[in-house]
Amino acid sequence: MHHFPLSGAALLLAAALIPAADAQTTWVKTSTQGVTAVQLDRATDLGPVNGDQAITVRVGLPMQNKAALEAYVKSVNDPSNPMYGQSLTPAQFVATYGATPAQVSAVTNYLKSAGFTNIVAEPNHLLVSADGTVAQANAAFHTTIESFNQYGAEVHGNLTAAEVPQSLAGDVSAVLGLNTIGQMRPTLVTRTQVATPQYAVSYSPQDFWKIYGATGLPPAANATIAIMAEGNLTQVLKDLRTAEAAFKLPQVAYTVVPVGIASADTSGADEWDLDTQYSTGMAGSVKHLYIYDTTSLTDSDLALEISRWATQDVAKAGSASLGECEIFPFLDGSMLVDDESFLEAAAQGQTFFASTGDTGSFCPVGVGTNGVPAGVPLANYPAASAYVVGVGGTTLLAASGDAYDQEVAWYAGGGGISQFEYCPYWQSAAGVVSCENNSKGLPDVSMDADPYSGANVYVDGAVVIVGGTSLSSPLALGTWARMISSNTKLGFAAPHLYGLYNGAVHPGAYPKGGFHDIIAGANGLYSALPGWDYTTGLGTFWINEMYADIK
Protein backbone atom coordinates (compact mmCIF):
# COMPACT_ATOMS: atom_id res chain seq x y z
CA MET A 1 0.00 0.00 0.00
CA HIS A 2 1.16 3.54 -0.64
CA HIS A 3 -0.06 7.06 -0.03
CA PHE A 4 -1.13 9.41 -2.80
CA PRO A 5 -0.51 11.57 -4.81
CA LEU A 6 0.21 9.18 -7.65
CA SER A 7 3.79 9.18 -8.84
CA GLY A 8 4.71 9.06 -12.49
CA ALA A 9 5.54 5.40 -12.11
CA ALA A 10 2.16 4.73 -10.56
CA LEU A 11 0.43 6.45 -13.45
CA LEU A 12 2.34 4.28 -15.90
CA LEU A 13 1.30 1.23 -13.91
CA ALA A 14 -2.31 2.42 -14.00
CA ALA A 15 -2.13 2.77 -17.76
CA ALA A 16 -0.75 -0.75 -18.01
CA LEU A 17 -3.65 -2.06 -15.94
CA ILE A 18 -6.30 -0.61 -18.27
CA PRO A 19 -8.02 -3.55 -19.96
CA ALA A 20 -6.90 -4.27 -23.48
CA ALA A 21 -9.38 -3.25 -26.14
CA ASP A 22 -9.79 -3.92 -29.82
CA ALA A 23 -6.78 -2.41 -31.54
CA GLN A 24 -9.13 -0.59 -33.90
CA THR A 25 -11.00 1.18 -31.07
CA THR A 26 -10.50 4.92 -30.86
CA TRP A 27 -11.36 6.27 -27.43
CA VAL A 28 -12.64 9.76 -26.58
CA LYS A 29 -12.66 11.32 -23.12
CA THR A 30 -15.73 12.29 -21.16
CA SER A 31 -15.88 15.01 -18.51
CA THR A 32 -15.26 12.35 -15.82
CA GLN A 33 -11.59 12.85 -15.05
CA GLY A 34 -9.17 10.50 -13.34
CA VAL A 35 -8.59 10.87 -9.61
CA THR A 36 -6.21 13.59 -8.49
CA ALA A 37 -4.17 14.35 -5.39
CA VAL A 38 -6.79 16.90 -4.33
CA GLN A 39 -9.41 14.16 -4.13
CA LEU A 40 -7.11 11.75 -2.33
CA ASP A 41 -6.28 13.80 0.73
CA ARG A 42 -5.03 11.39 3.43
CA ALA A 43 -5.94 8.39 1.29
CA THR A 44 -4.14 5.06 1.27
CA ASP A 45 -4.10 3.09 -1.97
CA LEU A 46 -5.47 -0.43 -1.48
CA GLY A 47 -4.90 -1.55 -5.07
CA PRO A 48 -7.28 -2.30 -7.95
CA VAL A 49 -10.86 -3.16 -7.01
CA ASN A 50 -11.74 -6.83 -7.50
CA GLY A 51 -13.09 -7.22 -11.01
CA ASP A 52 -16.03 -9.32 -9.82
CA GLN A 53 -17.29 -6.60 -7.46
CA ALA A 54 -20.72 -5.23 -8.39
CA ILE A 55 -20.98 -1.62 -9.51
CA THR A 56 -23.72 0.69 -10.72
CA VAL A 57 -22.78 3.26 -13.34
CA ARG A 58 -24.80 6.25 -14.44
CA VAL A 59 -24.06 7.66 -17.87
CA GLY A 60 -24.86 11.32 -18.42
CA LEU A 61 -26.15 12.38 -21.83
CA PRO A 62 -25.85 15.93 -23.19
CA MET A 63 -28.78 18.32 -23.22
CA GLN A 64 -29.89 19.73 -26.59
CA ASN A 65 -30.49 23.41 -27.28
CA LYS A 66 -29.18 24.58 -23.92
CA ALA A 67 -28.90 28.25 -24.93
CA ALA A 68 -32.51 28.25 -26.10
CA LEU A 69 -33.63 26.70 -22.80
CA GLU A 70 -31.78 29.34 -20.79
CA ALA A 71 -33.45 32.04 -22.90
CA TYR A 72 -36.80 30.40 -22.19
CA VAL A 73 -36.17 30.49 -18.43
CA LYS A 74 -35.38 34.18 -18.68
CA SER A 75 -38.55 34.94 -20.65
CA VAL A 76 -40.98 33.08 -18.39
CA ASN A 77 -39.60 34.76 -15.26
CA ASP A 78 -39.77 38.31 -16.65
CA PRO A 79 -43.03 40.05 -15.64
CA SER A 80 -42.76 42.33 -18.69
CA ASN A 81 -42.57 39.38 -21.13
CA PRO A 82 -45.77 37.95 -22.69
CA MET A 83 -44.49 34.48 -21.77
CA TYR A 84 -44.34 35.35 -18.06
CA GLY A 85 -45.68 32.61 -15.80
CA GLN A 86 -45.39 29.80 -18.33
CA SER A 87 -43.41 26.62 -17.71
CA LEU A 88 -42.52 23.45 -19.54
CA THR A 89 -43.96 20.05 -18.77
CA PRO A 90 -41.47 17.16 -18.48
CA ALA A 91 -42.79 15.82 -21.79
CA GLN A 92 -42.17 19.17 -23.50
CA PHE A 93 -38.69 19.28 -22.02
CA VAL A 94 -37.64 15.88 -23.29
CA ALA A 95 -39.08 16.52 -26.75
CA THR A 96 -36.93 19.61 -27.36
CA TYR A 97 -34.08 19.59 -24.85
CA GLY A 98 -33.38 16.02 -23.72
CA ALA A 99 -30.93 13.81 -25.58
CA THR A 100 -32.41 12.32 -28.74
CA PRO A 101 -33.92 8.82 -28.79
CA ALA A 102 -31.05 7.79 -31.07
CA GLN A 103 -28.51 8.93 -28.50
CA VAL A 104 -30.31 7.07 -25.71
CA SER A 105 -30.42 3.92 -27.85
CA ALA A 106 -26.73 4.21 -28.70
CA VAL A 107 -25.79 4.44 -25.02
CA THR A 108 -28.11 1.66 -23.85
CA ASN A 109 -26.98 -0.64 -26.67
CA TYR A 110 -23.34 -0.01 -25.79
CA LEU A 111 -23.93 -0.80 -22.13
CA LYS A 112 -25.76 -3.98 -23.08
CA SER A 113 -22.92 -5.05 -25.40
CA ALA A 114 -20.47 -4.43 -22.55
CA GLY A 115 -22.36 -6.89 -20.33
CA PHE A 116 -24.35 -4.48 -18.15
CA THR A 117 -27.87 -5.35 -16.99
CA ASN A 118 -30.83 -3.49 -15.43
CA ILE A 119 -30.27 -0.70 -17.92
CA VAL A 120 -32.73 2.14 -17.24
CA ALA A 121 -32.93 5.48 -19.04
CA GLU A 122 -34.49 8.31 -17.07
CA PRO A 123 -37.57 9.84 -18.74
CA ASN A 124 -35.76 13.13 -19.35
CA HIS A 125 -33.17 11.33 -21.51
CA LEU A 126 -30.28 12.82 -19.52
CA LEU A 127 -29.18 9.83 -17.44
CA VAL A 128 -28.90 6.07 -18.00
CA SER A 129 -28.23 3.70 -15.09
CA ALA A 130 -26.83 0.18 -15.43
CA ASP A 131 -25.54 -2.60 -13.18
CA GLY A 132 -22.41 -4.59 -13.88
CA THR A 133 -19.04 -5.57 -12.50
CA VAL A 134 -15.92 -3.51 -11.98
CA ALA A 135 -14.20 -5.51 -14.74
CA GLN A 136 -17.00 -4.62 -17.14
CA ALA A 137 -16.81 -0.93 -16.13
CA ASN A 138 -13.03 -0.90 -16.57
CA ALA A 139 -13.36 -2.32 -20.08
CA ALA A 140 -16.37 -0.23 -21.12
CA PHE A 141 -14.81 3.06 -20.03
CA HIS A 142 -11.13 2.29 -20.69
CA THR A 143 -9.89 2.86 -17.15
CA THR A 144 -8.91 1.07 -13.94
CA ILE A 145 -10.91 1.49 -10.74
CA GLU A 146 -8.69 1.61 -7.66
CA SER A 147 -9.67 1.17 -4.00
CA PHE A 148 -8.58 3.57 -1.22
CA ASN A 149 -8.98 3.96 2.50
CA GLN A 150 -9.83 7.58 3.29
CA TYR A 151 -10.91 8.99 6.66
CA GLY A 152 -11.56 5.44 7.87
CA ALA A 153 -13.86 4.45 5.00
CA GLU A 154 -13.18 2.46 1.84
CA VAL A 155 -13.82 4.36 -1.39
CA HIS A 156 -12.88 3.86 -5.00
CA GLY A 157 -11.97 5.98 -8.00
CA ASN A 158 -10.99 5.67 -11.66
CA LEU A 159 -7.27 6.27 -12.13
CA THR A 160 -7.63 7.74 -15.62
CA ALA A 161 -10.39 9.67 -17.36
CA ALA A 162 -13.50 7.72 -18.31
CA GLU A 163 -13.56 7.22 -22.07
CA VAL A 164 -16.02 5.86 -24.61
CA PRO A 165 -15.56 4.66 -28.19
CA GLN A 166 -15.47 7.28 -30.92
CA SER A 167 -18.88 6.08 -32.07
CA LEU A 168 -20.35 7.56 -28.86
CA ALA A 169 -18.58 10.91 -29.13
CA GLY A 170 -21.18 13.56 -28.46
CA ASP A 171 -23.55 11.05 -26.85
CA VAL A 172 -21.90 10.75 -23.41
CA SER A 173 -21.06 13.71 -21.18
CA ALA A 174 -19.97 11.90 -18.00
CA VAL A 175 -19.81 8.49 -16.34
CA LEU A 176 -20.80 8.48 -12.68
CA GLY A 177 -20.29 5.68 -10.18
CA LEU A 178 -16.66 5.03 -11.07
CA ASN A 179 -15.68 7.39 -8.27
CA THR A 180 -17.12 7.37 -4.72
CA ILE A 181 -14.45 9.68 -3.29
CA GLY A 182 -16.63 12.74 -3.84
CA GLN A 183 -19.52 12.53 -1.39
CA MET A 184 -21.85 15.22 -0.10
CA ARG A 185 -22.28 15.66 3.63
CA PRO A 186 -25.00 17.27 5.75
CA THR A 187 -24.28 20.86 6.78
CA LEU A 188 -25.65 20.41 10.28
CA VAL A 189 -24.03 21.84 13.41
CA THR A 190 -25.00 21.29 17.04
CA ARG A 191 -23.99 23.50 19.95
CA THR A 192 -21.41 20.98 21.13
CA GLN A 193 -19.44 21.46 17.90
CA VAL A 194 -18.67 25.16 18.35
CA ALA A 195 -17.34 27.47 21.05
CA THR A 196 -19.89 28.82 23.52
CA PRO A 197 -20.76 32.51 22.95
CA GLN A 198 -22.31 34.96 25.42
CA TYR A 199 -25.87 34.11 24.41
CA ALA A 200 -27.87 30.95 23.84
CA VAL A 201 -31.39 30.93 22.42
CA SER A 202 -33.41 28.55 20.28
CA TYR A 203 -36.57 28.85 18.25
CA SER A 204 -39.69 26.97 17.18
CA PRO A 205 -41.36 27.35 13.77
CA GLN A 206 -43.82 29.89 15.21
CA ASP A 207 -40.90 31.92 16.60
CA PHE A 208 -39.41 32.12 13.11
CA TRP A 209 -42.79 33.23 11.73
CA LYS A 210 -42.82 36.17 14.12
CA ILE A 211 -39.17 37.11 13.71
CA TYR A 212 -39.14 36.97 9.92
CA GLY A 213 -42.58 38.53 9.50
CA ALA A 214 -44.77 35.63 8.37
CA THR A 215 -47.56 36.10 10.93
CA GLY A 216 -50.81 37.13 9.35
CA LEU A 217 -49.88 35.50 6.04
CA PRO A 218 -51.60 32.35 4.84
CA PRO A 219 -49.73 29.08 5.22
CA ALA A 220 -48.49 27.33 2.09
CA ALA A 221 -51.54 25.09 1.82
CA ASN A 222 -51.35 24.93 -2.00
CA ALA A 223 -47.59 24.30 -2.28
CA THR A 224 -45.82 21.01 -2.93
CA ILE A 225 -42.25 20.77 -1.64
CA ALA A 226 -39.48 18.18 -1.49
CA ILE A 227 -36.54 17.21 0.70
CA MET A 228 -33.52 15.26 -0.50
CA ALA A 229 -32.67 12.47 1.97
CA GLU A 230 -30.91 9.13 2.24
CA GLY A 231 -31.25 5.88 4.18
CA ASN A 232 -33.88 4.52 6.54
CA LEU A 233 -36.47 7.22 7.30
CA THR A 234 -38.70 5.30 9.72
CA GLN A 235 -37.75 7.35 12.79
CA VAL A 236 -37.67 10.58 10.76
CA LEU A 237 -41.33 10.17 9.88
CA LYS A 238 -42.21 9.44 13.51
CA ASP A 239 -40.26 12.51 14.61
CA LEU A 240 -42.14 14.66 12.09
CA ARG A 241 -45.45 13.69 13.66
CA THR A 242 -44.03 14.27 17.15
CA ALA A 243 -42.86 17.74 16.16
CA GLU A 244 -46.17 18.63 14.52
CA ALA A 245 -48.03 17.70 17.71
CA ALA A 246 -45.57 19.57 19.94
CA PHE A 247 -45.64 22.70 17.77
CA LYS A 248 -49.42 22.47 17.26
CA LEU A 249 -49.04 22.30 13.49
CA PRO A 250 -51.28 20.35 11.11
CA GLN A 251 -50.05 16.97 9.95
CA VAL A 252 -48.73 17.23 6.41
CA ALA A 253 -49.41 14.61 3.79
CA TYR A 254 -46.13 13.05 2.71
CA THR A 255 -44.77 10.55 0.21
CA VAL A 256 -41.40 8.85 0.45
CA VAL A 257 -40.02 8.43 -3.07
CA PRO A 258 -37.46 5.60 -3.20
CA VAL A 259 -34.52 6.36 -5.52
CA GLY A 260 -32.21 3.42 -6.11
CA ILE A 261 -31.57 0.52 -3.74
CA ALA A 262 -33.01 0.88 -0.24
CA SER A 263 -30.47 1.55 2.50
CA ALA A 264 -30.64 0.82 6.23
CA ASP A 265 -28.35 3.75 7.04
CA THR A 266 -29.66 6.10 9.76
CA SER A 267 -26.55 8.26 10.22
CA GLY A 268 -28.23 11.26 8.60
CA ALA A 269 -31.53 10.99 10.48
CA ASP A 270 -31.00 14.16 12.53
CA GLU A 271 -30.44 16.06 9.28
CA TRP A 272 -33.64 14.74 7.70
CA ASP A 273 -35.47 15.53 10.97
CA LEU A 274 -34.38 19.15 10.68
CA ASP A 275 -35.20 19.37 6.98
CA THR A 276 -38.70 17.93 7.20
CA GLN A 277 -39.74 19.72 10.41
CA TYR A 278 -38.50 23.20 9.48
CA SER A 279 -39.44 23.27 5.80
CA THR A 280 -43.04 22.37 6.57
CA GLY A 281 -42.91 24.26 9.88
CA MET A 282 -41.77 27.50 8.27
CA ALA A 283 -44.42 27.03 5.58
CA GLY A 284 -47.11 26.60 8.24
CA SER A 285 -48.59 23.81 6.15
CA VAL A 286 -48.07 22.38 2.68
CA LYS A 287 -50.27 20.54 0.24
CA HIS A 288 -47.78 17.67 0.06
CA LEU A 289 -44.24 16.87 1.18
CA TYR A 290 -42.15 14.56 -1.02
CA ILE A 291 -39.09 13.01 0.58
CA TYR A 292 -36.70 11.67 -2.04
CA ASP A 293 -34.77 8.82 -0.45
CA THR A 294 -31.63 7.59 -2.16
CA THR A 295 -29.07 4.88 -1.40
CA SER A 296 -26.04 6.92 -0.39
CA LEU A 297 -24.59 10.43 -0.53
CA THR A 298 -22.22 9.65 -3.36
CA ASP A 299 -22.31 12.03 -6.31
CA SER A 300 -23.75 9.26 -8.48
CA ASP A 301 -26.69 8.41 -6.21
CA LEU A 302 -27.48 12.08 -5.60
CA ALA A 303 -27.40 12.79 -9.33
CA LEU A 304 -30.15 10.22 -9.79
CA GLU A 305 -32.12 11.71 -6.88
CA ILE A 306 -31.91 15.26 -8.26
CA SER A 307 -32.81 14.04 -11.73
CA ARG A 308 -35.82 12.16 -10.36
CA TRP A 309 -37.07 15.30 -8.55
CA ALA A 310 -36.87 17.28 -11.80
CA THR A 311 -38.28 14.54 -14.01
CA GLN A 312 -41.30 13.83 -11.82
CA ASP A 313 -42.07 17.55 -11.43
CA VAL A 314 -44.50 16.96 -8.55
CA ALA A 315 -42.76 19.28 -6.06
CA LYS A 316 -42.38 22.90 -7.14
CA ALA A 317 -39.62 23.59 -4.63
CA GLY A 318 -37.01 21.41 -2.97
CA SER A 319 -34.09 21.63 -0.59
CA ALA A 320 -30.85 19.78 0.07
CA SER A 321 -28.95 20.57 3.26
CA LEU A 322 -25.94 18.91 1.70
CA GLY A 323 -22.74 20.00 0.06
CA GLU A 324 -19.18 19.25 -0.91
CA CYS A 325 -16.22 21.17 -2.21
CA GLU A 326 -17.13 22.08 -5.78
CA ILE A 327 -13.93 20.66 -7.25
CA PHE A 328 -15.10 17.09 -6.53
CA PRO A 329 -18.28 17.11 -8.69
CA PHE A 330 -16.37 19.07 -11.32
CA LEU A 331 -13.71 16.35 -11.55
CA ASP A 332 -16.03 13.34 -11.50
CA GLY A 333 -18.48 14.88 -13.98
CA SER A 334 -21.53 15.03 -11.71
CA MET A 335 -21.54 18.84 -11.79
CA LEU A 336 -22.27 18.75 -15.51
CA VAL A 337 -25.02 16.14 -15.03
CA ASP A 338 -26.67 17.88 -12.06
CA ASP A 339 -26.56 21.31 -13.67
CA GLU A 340 -28.64 19.97 -16.56
CA SER A 341 -31.24 18.66 -14.09
CA PHE A 342 -31.34 22.01 -12.29
CA LEU A 343 -31.83 23.87 -15.57
CA GLU A 344 -34.62 21.49 -16.56
CA ALA A 345 -36.27 22.10 -13.20
CA ALA A 346 -36.03 25.88 -13.59
CA ALA A 347 -37.71 25.66 -17.00
CA GLN A 348 -40.50 23.63 -15.37
CA GLY A 349 -41.00 26.33 -12.73
CA GLN A 350 -39.21 24.47 -9.94
CA THR A 351 -36.72 25.91 -7.43
CA PHE A 352 -33.95 24.04 -5.64
CA PHE A 353 -32.44 25.48 -2.45
CA ALA A 354 -29.10 24.23 -1.10
CA SER A 355 -26.91 25.02 1.89
CA THR A 356 -23.74 26.99 1.21
CA GLY A 357 -21.89 25.12 3.95
CA ASP A 358 -20.58 25.59 7.46
CA THR A 359 -16.90 26.31 6.84
CA GLY A 360 -17.11 30.03 6.14
CA SER A 361 -15.54 31.38 2.98
CA PHE A 362 -13.96 28.00 2.33
CA CYS A 363 -15.17 24.58 1.31
CA PRO A 364 -14.53 21.57 3.52
CA VAL A 365 -11.65 19.19 3.03
CA GLY A 366 -12.01 16.13 5.21
CA VAL A 367 -14.73 15.30 7.71
CA GLY A 368 -15.83 16.79 11.00
CA THR A 369 -15.11 20.37 9.93
CA ASN A 370 -18.61 21.88 10.18
CA GLY A 371 -18.67 25.05 12.25
CA VAL A 372 -15.03 25.86 11.49
CA PRO A 373 -14.20 28.57 8.90
CA ALA A 374 -11.31 26.70 7.32
CA GLY A 375 -10.52 24.63 4.22
CA VAL A 376 -9.77 25.70 0.66
CA PRO A 377 -11.16 28.92 -0.89
CA LEU A 378 -13.74 27.29 -3.14
CA ALA A 379 -17.52 27.22 -2.97
CA ASN A 380 -19.85 24.42 -1.89
CA TYR A 381 -21.84 22.47 -4.47
CA PRO A 382 -24.72 22.21 -5.34
CA ALA A 383 -25.30 25.68 -3.84
CA ALA A 384 -22.78 27.00 -6.39
CA SER A 385 -24.85 25.82 -9.35
CA ALA A 386 -26.20 28.69 -11.43
CA TYR A 387 -29.75 27.29 -11.30
CA VAL A 388 -29.76 26.61 -7.55
CA VAL A 389 -30.54 29.15 -4.82
CA GLY A 390 -27.61 28.96 -2.38
CA VAL A 391 -28.63 29.68 1.21
CA GLY A 392 -26.10 31.08 3.66
CA GLY A 393 -26.32 31.65 7.39
CA THR A 394 -26.74 34.31 10.04
CA THR A 395 -26.69 34.64 13.81
CA LEU A 396 -30.21 35.71 14.75
CA LEU A 397 -30.86 37.96 17.74
CA ALA A 398 -34.54 38.59 18.40
CA ALA A 399 -35.97 41.18 20.75
CA SER A 400 -38.38 40.29 23.53
CA GLY A 401 -41.64 38.96 22.16
CA ASP A 402 -39.80 37.44 19.18
CA ALA A 403 -39.80 40.70 17.23
CA TYR A 404 -37.04 41.09 14.67
CA ASP A 405 -34.07 42.88 16.20
CA GLN A 406 -30.83 42.20 14.35
CA GLU A 407 -28.77 39.61 12.55
CA VAL A 408 -25.09 39.35 11.80
CA ALA A 409 -23.33 37.08 9.35
CA TRP A 410 -22.64 33.74 11.03
CA TYR A 411 -18.88 33.32 11.19
CA ALA A 412 -19.05 29.80 9.67
CA GLY A 413 -21.73 30.50 7.05
CA GLY A 414 -20.66 29.61 3.52
CA GLY A 415 -19.98 32.26 0.91
CA GLY A 416 -17.50 33.23 -1.77
CA ILE A 417 -16.78 32.90 -5.48
CA SER A 418 -17.33 29.75 -7.52
CA GLN A 419 -14.38 28.73 -9.66
CA PHE A 420 -16.46 26.47 -11.90
CA GLU A 421 -19.97 27.96 -12.20
CA TYR A 422 -20.77 30.97 -14.35
CA CYS A 423 -22.54 34.16 -13.29
CA PRO A 424 -26.27 33.90 -14.07
CA TYR A 425 -28.01 36.85 -15.72
CA TRP A 426 -29.94 37.84 -12.59
CA GLN A 427 -26.70 38.27 -10.62
CA SER A 428 -25.12 40.18 -13.47
CA ALA A 429 -28.06 42.59 -13.57
CA ALA A 430 -27.71 43.11 -9.82
CA GLY A 431 -24.03 44.00 -10.14
CA VAL A 432 -22.67 41.07 -8.12
CA VAL A 433 -18.91 41.60 -8.03
CA SER A 434 -17.98 38.04 -9.00
CA CYS A 435 -19.78 38.54 -12.32
CA GLU A 436 -16.86 40.68 -13.46
CA ASN A 437 -15.07 37.35 -13.91
CA ASN A 438 -18.26 35.55 -15.02
CA SER A 439 -18.38 33.57 -11.77
CA LYS A 440 -21.35 32.90 -9.54
CA GLY A 441 -21.17 34.59 -6.15
CA LEU A 442 -22.50 32.95 -3.00
CA PRO A 443 -24.76 32.99 -1.13
CA ASP A 444 -27.92 34.12 -2.87
CA VAL A 445 -29.95 34.56 0.33
CA SER A 446 -29.54 33.65 3.99
CA MET A 447 -31.47 32.66 7.09
CA ASP A 448 -30.63 31.77 10.69
CA ALA A 449 -27.87 29.15 10.96
CA ASP A 450 -25.92 29.70 14.18
CA PRO A 451 -26.55 26.72 16.51
CA TYR A 452 -26.60 29.22 19.41
CA SER A 453 -29.64 30.82 17.79
CA GLY A 454 -30.79 27.50 16.38
CA ALA A 455 -33.95 25.44 16.05
CA ASN A 456 -35.69 23.07 18.43
CA VAL A 457 -35.68 19.82 16.46
CA TYR A 458 -37.22 16.52 17.52
CA VAL A 459 -34.64 13.75 17.12
CA ASP A 460 -35.61 10.27 18.38
CA GLY A 461 -38.59 11.87 20.08
CA ALA A 462 -36.62 14.44 22.11
CA VAL A 463 -35.63 18.04 21.45
CA VAL A 464 -32.12 18.78 20.17
CA ILE A 465 -30.99 22.33 19.34
CA VAL A 466 -29.52 22.39 15.86
CA GLY A 467 -28.09 24.96 13.47
CA GLY A 468 -25.86 25.24 10.44
CA THR A 469 -26.88 26.13 6.92
CA SER A 470 -28.74 22.82 7.22
CA LEU A 471 -31.30 24.99 9.03
CA SER A 472 -31.22 28.01 6.76
CA SER A 473 -31.99 26.04 3.58
CA PRO A 474 -35.28 24.46 4.77
CA LEU A 475 -36.27 27.80 6.30
CA ALA A 476 -35.82 29.37 2.86
CA LEU A 477 -37.76 26.53 1.26
CA GLY A 478 -40.66 27.01 3.68
CA THR A 479 -40.65 30.74 3.04
CA TRP A 480 -40.71 30.29 -0.73
CA ALA A 481 -43.53 27.77 -0.35
CA ARG A 482 -45.68 30.58 1.10
CA MET A 483 -44.92 32.72 -1.95
CA ILE A 484 -45.78 30.12 -4.59
CA SER A 485 -48.83 28.89 -2.70
CA SER A 486 -50.62 32.19 -3.41
CA ASN A 487 -48.87 33.37 -6.57
CA THR A 488 -48.96 30.61 -9.15
CA LYS A 489 -47.08 32.69 -11.74
CA LEU A 490 -43.90 32.56 -9.71
CA GLY A 491 -41.54 30.02 -11.21
CA PHE A 492 -37.83 29.61 -10.55
CA ALA A 493 -37.09 31.80 -7.53
CA ALA A 494 -33.70 33.37 -8.26
CA PRO A 495 -34.73 35.93 -10.94
CA HIS A 496 -37.64 37.08 -8.76
CA LEU A 497 -35.49 37.45 -5.65
CA TYR A 498 -32.81 39.43 -7.47
CA GLY A 499 -35.54 41.43 -9.21
CA LEU A 500 -36.57 42.79 -5.82
CA TYR A 501 -32.98 43.73 -5.06
CA ASN A 502 -32.72 45.58 -8.34
CA GLY A 503 -35.18 48.13 -7.03
CA ALA A 504 -38.03 47.20 -9.35
CA VAL A 505 -40.46 47.62 -6.45
CA HIS A 506 -38.82 50.23 -4.22
CA PRO A 507 -36.18 51.99 -6.35
CA GLY A 508 -33.22 53.10 -4.29
CA ALA A 509 -34.78 51.93 -1.05
CA TYR A 510 -33.15 48.53 -0.48
CA PRO A 511 -33.60 46.63 1.85
CA LYS A 512 -37.27 47.24 1.11
CA GLY A 513 -38.73 44.60 -1.17
CA GLY A 514 -38.43 41.58 1.04
CA PHE A 515 -34.95 41.43 2.61
CA HIS A 516 -33.19 42.37 5.80
CA ASP A 517 -29.81 43.73 4.71
CA ILE A 518 -27.12 42.23 6.96
CA ILE A 519 -24.25 44.67 7.40
CA ALA A 520 -22.23 43.19 10.30
CA GLY A 521 -20.19 40.04 10.77
CA ALA A 522 -17.72 38.06 8.68
CA ASN A 523 -17.17 34.48 7.49
CA GLY A 524 -13.41 34.33 7.06
CA LEU A 525 -12.26 36.10 3.91
CA TYR A 526 -15.37 38.26 3.57
CA SER A 527 -17.31 40.78 5.65
CA ALA A 528 -20.96 41.77 5.58
CA LEU A 529 -21.55 45.05 3.74
CA PRO A 530 -24.55 47.16 2.65
CA GLY A 531 -26.29 45.45 -0.25
CA TRP A 532 -25.39 42.04 -1.66
CA ASP A 533 -22.23 40.49 -0.20
CA TYR A 534 -20.31 37.22 0.09
CA THR A 535 -21.52 36.52 3.63
CA THR A 536 -25.33 36.72 3.40
CA GLY A 537 -26.06 37.49 -0.27
CA LEU A 538 -29.23 39.54 -0.66
CA GLY A 539 -29.92 39.17 3.06
CA THR A 540 -32.61 37.32 5.01
CA PHE A 541 -36.28 37.12 4.16
CA TRP A 542 -38.59 39.90 5.32
CA ILE A 543 -41.59 37.79 4.51
CA ASN A 544 -44.55 40.14 4.70
CA GLU A 545 -42.69 42.72 2.56
CA MET A 546 -41.73 40.07 0.04
CA TYR A 547 -45.23 38.65 -0.07
CA ALA A 548 -46.60 42.11 -0.96
CA ASP A 549 -43.90 43.08 -3.45
CA ILE A 550 -42.73 40.03 -5.35
CA LYS A 551 -43.81 39.72 -8.97
Image (tube, grey):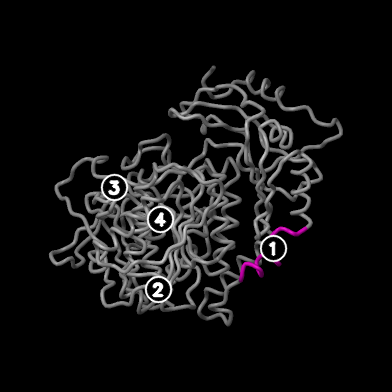
- Circle 1/circle 3 CB separation < 8 Å: no
Viewer can see residue 357: yes
Q: Amino acid at mark 4?
A: Pro
Q: CA distance from mark 1 to mark 3?
A: 41 Å
- Circle 4/circle 3 CB separation < 8 Å: no
* Nearer the observer, 229 or 79: 229
Dot placed on the residue nearer the N-terminal end, 3 or 2: 3
Q: What is the magenta range?
A: 89-101
- Circle 3/circle 2 CB separation < 8 Å: no
The label shown at residue 411 is 3
Q: Is residue 426 left or right of residue 362?
A: right
Q: Is residue 303 left or right of residue 482?
A: right
Dot placed on the residue nearer the N-terminal end, 1 or 4: 1
What residue did someone put label 2 on? 483
Q: Amino acid at mark 1?
A: Asn
Q: Residues within 10 Å of mark 3 (few under 14, many from 20)?
A: many
- Residue 1 x %, y %: 54, 17
- Residue 508 x %, y %: 35, 74
SS type, badge 2: helix
What residue did someone put label 4 on? 443
What residue did someone put label 1 on? 65
Q: Amino acid at mark 2?
A: Met
Dot placed on the residue nearer the N-terminal end, 1 or 3: 1
Q: Residue at x 74, y 54 (%)?
A: 104
Q: Residue at x 52, y 39 (%)?
A: 182
Q: CA distance from mark 3 to mark 2?
A: 29 Å
Viewer can see residue 389: no
Q: Residues within 10 Å of mark 2 (few under 14, many from 20)?
A: many
Q: CA distance from mark 4 to mark 3?
A: 14 Å
SS type, badge 1: loop
